[in-house]
Amino acid sequence: QKEVEQDPGPLSVPEGAIVSLNCTYSNSAFQYFMWYRQYSRKGPELLMYTYSSGNKEDGRFTAQVDKSSKYISLFIRDSQPSDSATYLCATTSGGYNKLIFGAGTRLAVHP
Amino acid sequence: GAVVSQHPSRVICKSGTSVKIECRSLDFQATTMFWYRQFPKQSLMLMATSNEGSKATYEQGVEKDKFLINHASLTLSTLTVTSAHPEDSSFYICSAREGTGSDTQYFGPGTRLTVL
């Protein structure tokens, strides 16, 4: 079993839709959770960073962590074609431990 | 803030040659840098963790004599692919962790290596 599971998609939605991206993880020691966006042939860009359970909102993006079910989500409201990219979830237990990445979900937002 | 650069962005080389890739943190000091490789449509695979002034820690299955990592300063790490072969062709990405007490990694734009 992988430490972080993420459906690779692809996920195709119309412009303006609400997008829900999800990951599950197995290690209860994970405390820090991130979402990265990666455009084709580019390095990942940090979108959201959360610690422990709860929600965090930044513009059209909301990150949600439920440690009781080991489930992390990223919601994108009013999705735009420019949101088309691969979204990677990542987590770590902290203490300078390495990041564990999900497989990445490819999202396509069509006009 | 938190910008990481990589150079070159793309390199094509002949089999058997060595290639050096630079990773720089432009506006912060990075005590730790990471090197990843990524195959098409796959996630990031951590190759090694590099701490300034000390030897890199390699992940299982990564040949340390083939992928030489140097982290000589708080803003620069280099990855040298020695005696490159076509199977080394990949997208290499570095990341840098900002200072101490932070788990956030900032990624460079990546280097596309093609070995002929």
Image: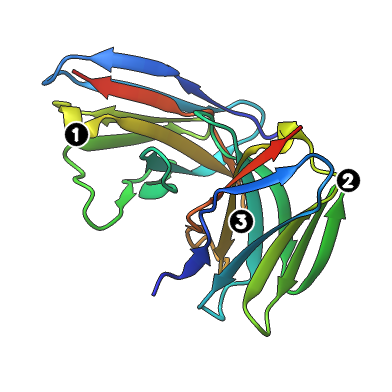
* In this rendering, position of residue A28 left or right of residue B54: right
Image quadrant where one finds the C terminus of chain B:
top left
Q: Pointer 1: what residue? A: B87
Label 2 – label 1 distance at C-alpha? 42 Å
**Circle nearer the N terminus (1, 3):** 1
What amino acid type should be assigned to the residue bearing mark 3? Asp
Q: Pointer 2: what residue? A: A59
Count of picture labels: 3
Q: Secondary structure at mark 3?
A: loop
Which chain does tag 2 point to? Answer: A
* In this rendering, position of residue B7 left or right of residue B100: left
Residue B108 placement (x, y as % from top left):
53, 31
Q: Secondary structure at mark 1?
A: helix
At a point 53% along the width and 62% down the height, the residue shown is A6
Q: Are marks 1 and 3 on the same chain?
A: yes
At a point 55% along the width and 48% down the height, the residue shown is A10
Asked if disc 3 and disc 2 are in contact, CB closer than 8 Å, the reply is: no
Which chain does tag 3 point to? Answer: B
Viewer-proximal residue, A97 or B12? B12
Which chain does tag 1 point to? Answer: B
Residue A41 placement (x, y as % from top left):
49, 28
Q: Are marks 3 and 2 on the same chain?
A: no
What amino acid type should be assigned to the residue bearing mark 2? Gly
Residue B42 placement (x, y as % from top left):
41, 46
Q: Secondary structure at mark 2?
A: loop
Report the mark closest to the observer, 1 or 3.
1
Image mark for residue B103:
3
Q: Residue furthest bottom?
A: A68
What amino acid type should be assigned to the residue bearing mark 1? Glu
Label 3 – label 2 distance at C-alpha? 23 Å
Residue A21 placement (x, y as % from top left):
67, 58
* In this rendering, position of residue A23 left or right of residue B88: right
